Image (cartoon, rainbow, N blue to C red):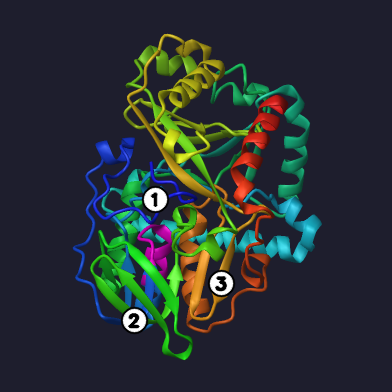
Amino acid sequence: MFDPLVNAPPGPHDAPGASYWQLHTQAEFPQCTDTPEDVDFAIIGGGYTGLSAARTLAENGHSVAVFEANNLAWGCSSRNAGFVMKSTGRLGLSAWAKRFGEDVAKGIAQEHGLGLRLIEKTIEECPEHCQRQSGGYLKVAHKLASVTPLQQQYDSLRQFEQPVEWLDNSALSQVINSPQAHAALRFTDCFAVNPLLLAAATARRAAKAGAQLVEHCPVTSAASLGKKGVYLETAKGNVRARKLLVCSNGYTSQQLLPKLASRSLPVLSSIITTPPLSQEQADSIHLSPEYAIMDTRILKYYFRLLPDNRLLFGGRGAIQGKNAEDPVFAKRLLQAMHQTFPQLRGVTQWDNFWSGWVSVSLDDYPRVGKFSDNIYASMGYCGAGVSFSALAGQRLAECAMGAALPKLPYYQSQLKPFPLPKFRRLAQWLYYHYGRLLD
């Protein structure tokens, strides 16, 4: 599998990930265009962020071209679990308040709410409404020791007037039957979608606004020319642009923009789906497709029952891309699923197994804005980017157009460089062992 720390930019014509979504979804993407020679804004990355940025720029009258190395949504926009949550990074609102004060935390909450509304607007333009499931997002205490910290988070969220409910063990048992479910927060305004349908709907909005979408066209070189703009070499010809927006997040190649990529740690998140559960099996776990669920582990597991009664179950995968497709990691997820739902020990195989790169930042939250002369970037979502990416793309486009962004940490500084970046994977390996010990 393509590894951003090792390989050159992927494509063209690399096969899409064999995800459940790719195999079971008929998604209507817009017709793509030829490569322009000159454009106001060039965008690297045809996922949620890049397509949202393209729509925003085109709606404001600018010429814009999105360059995707493979087919649109080839990266995590077609590989994620479809959780639409009001968060990004690894910091909750109480952590934001502790670091930066309550006004900043409230501003962050407002931004997350705006991101959710942007996704909802896109969903409205999809004939299938992106297969939306609106039961809410559950954060589940996987052990008794996690209940008190989760209760404290609930109290904090209520102070910020967030739409969240507390489910004690009795109430939670009506939603999920698991020995690793002791209490939960239910975020009532969050939901789950088919991520590939969401990507297609986002692409259609960008194309309708006038953005040029160029597939199977990896950018192999990008150089700022100062006042003359940016010069790109691509697989389909050379391009000159006034400004470049880098929207490849976890797929940002170390070889293309090393000074930017060294500020992110690409981490694999892996997912399996089971064969369709029998009605008896589905009833035994008390789970319905309306809920998206994640636990309180350091190395979190997340899962949802899909509309066709398959159970999707995800968590951290291999450390290096060359090992991503090793079935040992699928077996680990299957074992974790059995621990979560002992009733499903009879499910001994998976139907689908795939992975995607998550961009993790050093200080646990993303950055959106100017990186260097004529180059802008948005990355570091830490695995919670489905809703935020829509907002991040819009904010990045606004920044590139010269608009003032909200005075929030996301937009006021660049990603911090990792110390000794060559040893990022070693540090990740040590952290995984530490996390598994605590979990």
Residue at mark 3 to residue at mark 2: CA–CA distance: 21 Å
Return the x and y of residue 326 as percentages of the image width and height.
Answer: 41, 27
Residue under numbered circle 1: 77
Foreground residue among 182 and 356: 356
Q: Earlier in the sequence, mark 1 or mark 2?
A: 1
Residue under numbered circle 2: 240
As drawn, the label of residue 369 is 3
Q: Earlier in the sequence, mark 3 or mark 1?
A: 1
Return the x and y of residue 63 as percentages of the image width and height.
Answer: 32, 81
* Residue drawn at 39 percent across, 66 percent down: 44
Amino acid residing under circle 1: Ser
Amino acid residing under circle 2: Arg
The relative height of residue 129 versus residue 42 in the rendered view (above or below) is above
* Residue drawn at 56 percent across, 67 percent down: 368
Q: Residues within 10 Å of mark 2 (few under 14, many from 20)?
A: many
Foreground residue among 157 and 195: 195
Q: Quadrant for the N terminus, please.
A: top left
Q: Is residue 66 left or right of residue 395?
A: left
Q: Quadrant of residue 271?
A: top left
Return the x and y of residue 378 as percentages of the image width and height.
Answer: 52, 64
Do tag 1 and tag 2 residues touch (Cβ < 8 Å)?
Answer: no
